[in-house]
Image (cartoon, helix red, strand yellow):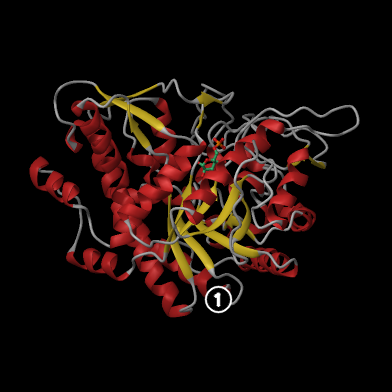
């Protein structure tokens, strides 16, 4: 039976997304400073990446080479153009602009690099979609200021934002501030939590840190990031009223494990514990459950009246989201799940959902669910999907072809569910940028073999290989999807 087809508007932004630290390499070129991504070693599935004290000789730091996009962006963008990309998301490496974060002047070589990059995109008719902070900040700001736990970092970020907004005033329209800002709300003793808070906020916990210590540090850092984002939004609009500036969050939906009232409440509280940052981005105010948590728990984060004014004055124009999978939770006790209990829930396996080789769930309908949920929470909000895709092992055949039906299947089903959300449910989705259209270094594991691309890059986990680019079968498929405005999926 053939499936329904849906066509999206002509101006829908089809394309792909990467991040500077996973692709550019050239970690010291053109005066670039050391970033928090440059001190992350390679990990693997179930082996967390280590954060080292500075760069230690002899260890493998995959972000140092990425896929050398710093030198290959012209040929890589030509391939994206061949697929018909309307938009391409990447980030600016803060350390190319302010190598230490608190330098007196911006670094001209870094600014010039992004001038060239954005010019090259425009040459192909590709709209840049730019993240200001994607899992990297100057390492110096961690050492000298304690990362985002320090209020002074707000001013340093806003200055960085102002410099790039002015410089690229006529080259970039779509911006977003902090990538997946709410990852760090998933407080736990699992080593992965250290990775999440490091990449979001440049904070490192010592072994004695309790869950309460982590929660307080995270809420404070998150608040400073939200204020910095709001101030950047306001300044951005003053620099160019046509700027479209968003927040960015991973919105993997939560599902309750059963319809038991305890599971339902645990599910709802899990969602609230994560979504307060998005609420602040979109509404400019803390949700009532967070305010009550502050009152009740005696934890008084540094939130000034001026901060509250800034938050109200800098609400985002849209939300950028990543969507990979869903999370199913169940209550662990009969106790209600308040914020100070760090969630009364545990994550459980959902038997209705298959997983990929890295145990990430594959749940296309969850994307429609999540888009509708966001539209209910924030009616009429514009949403751009800026990450979606499947990490998978690819095999090169003897003739150089790469058959990746698993990737096509994953994307086809997700795009179809997104189209239903737009066409049938009326959610205002303005773009679909799949993650890693060209293979890049995995953020979570540092591996190259966890590949998302339509374009294969011949490099292994040690950064060895020819670096040659090869088109996978999915390359031709995505080209048809874009050419048909999303109608030809099968
Ligand atoms: C998102 C990040 O969390 O997931 C990306 O914004 C990341 O930077 C992507 O690459 C996929 O995760 P991973 O670990 O497979 O690279």
Residue visible at 58% across and 39% down in the picture: 413
Q: Is residue 340 above or below residue 317?
A: above
Task: Tell me: is circle 1 under 8 Å from ligand 1.
Answer: no
Q: Where does the image place residue 333, in percent across and percent down from the top left?
A: 18, 20
In this orientation, does residue 106 appear?
yes
Label 1: which secondary element: loop
In this orientation, does residue 250 appear?
no
Q: Where does the image place residue 111, in percent across and percent down from the top left?
A: 61, 67
Residue that badge 1 annotates = 169
Residue visible at 71% across and 43% down in the picture: 67
Extreme residue toward the right, this view: 399
Pick whichever, 362 or 418, lies toward us: 418
Determine the quadrant in which ligand 1 lies: top right
Pick whichever, 161 or 342, lies toward us: 342
Q: Is residue 387 above or below residue 172?
A: above
The C terminus, quarter of image:
top right
Q: Where does the image place residue 53, in percent across and percent down from the top left?
A: 48, 36
Q: Is residue 328 left or right of residue 50?
A: left
Q: How many marks?
A: 1
Q: Where does the image place residue 196, in percent across and percent down from the top left?
A: 42, 37
Q: Is residue 263 left or right of residue 45?
A: left
Pick whichever, 324 or 180, lies toward us: 324
Q: Is residue 63 above or below residue 112?
A: above
Query: Within 10 Å of the Cα at label 1, are there few (<14), some (14-19), or many (20+) other Cα atoms?
Result: some
Residue visible at 52% across and 22% down in the picture: 47
The N terminus, quarter of image:
top right
């Amino acid at each position: 039976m053939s499936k329904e087809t849906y066509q999206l508007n002509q101006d829908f932004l089809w394309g792909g997304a990467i991040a500077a630290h996973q692709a550019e390499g050239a970690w010291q070129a053109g005066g670039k400073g050391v970033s928090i991504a440059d001190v992350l070693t390679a990990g693997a599935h179930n082996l967390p990446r280590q954060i080292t004290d500075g760069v230690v000789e002899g260890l493998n730091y995959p972000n140092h080479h990425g896929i050398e996009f710093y030198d290959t962006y012209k040929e890589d963008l030509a391939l994206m153009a061949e697929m018909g990309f309307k938009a391409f998301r990447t980030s600016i490496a803060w350390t190319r602009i302010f190598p230490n974060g608190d330098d007196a002047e911006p670094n001209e070589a870094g600014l010039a690099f992004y001038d060239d990059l954005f010019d090259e995109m425009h040459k192909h008719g590709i709209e840049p979609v730019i993240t200001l902070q994607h899992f990297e900040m100057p390492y110096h700001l961690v050492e000298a200021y304690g990362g985002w736990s320090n209020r002074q970092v707000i001013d340093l970020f806003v200055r960085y934002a102002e410099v790039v907004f002015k410089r690229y005033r006529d080259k970039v329209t779509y911006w977003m501030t902090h990538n997946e800002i709410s990852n760090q709300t998933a407080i736990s003793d699992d080593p992965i939590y250290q990775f999440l808070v490091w990449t979001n906020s440049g904070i490192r916990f010592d072994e004695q840190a309790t869950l309460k210590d982590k929660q307080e540090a995270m809420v404070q850092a998150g608040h400073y990031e939200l204020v910095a984002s709001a101030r950047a939004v306001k300044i951005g609009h003053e620099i160019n009223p046509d700027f479209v500036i968003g927040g960015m969050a991973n919105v993997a939906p939560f599902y309750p494990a059963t319809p038991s009232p305890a599971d339902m409440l645990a599910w709802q509280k899990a969602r609230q514990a994560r979504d307060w940052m998005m609420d602040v981005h979109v509404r400019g105010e803390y949700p009532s459950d967070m305010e009550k948590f502050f009152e009740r728990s005696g934890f008084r984060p540094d939130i000034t009246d001026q901060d509250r004014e800034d938050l109200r004055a800098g609400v985002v124009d849209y939300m950028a989201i990543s969507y990979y999978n869903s999370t199913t939770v169940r209550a662990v006790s009969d106790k209600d799940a308040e914020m100070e209990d760090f969630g009364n829930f545990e994550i459980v396996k959902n038997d209705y959902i298959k997983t990929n080789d890295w145990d990430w769930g594959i749940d296309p309908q969850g994307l429609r669910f999540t888009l509708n949920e966001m539209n209910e929470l924030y009616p009429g909000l514009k949403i751009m999907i800026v990450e979606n895709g499947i990490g998978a092992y690819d095999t090169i055949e003897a003739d150089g072809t790469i058959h990746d039906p698993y990737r096509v299947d994953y994307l086809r089903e997700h795009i179809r569910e997104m189209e239903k959300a737009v066409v049938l449910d009326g959610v205002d989705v303005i773009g679909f940028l799949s993650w890693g259209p060209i293979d890049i270094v995995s953020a979570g594991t540092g591996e190259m073999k966890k590949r998302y691309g339509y374009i294969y890059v011949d490099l292994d986990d040690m950064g060895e290989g020819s670096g040659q680019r090869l088109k996978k079968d999915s390359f031709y498929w995505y080209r048809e999807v874009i050419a048909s405005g999303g109608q030809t999926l099968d």
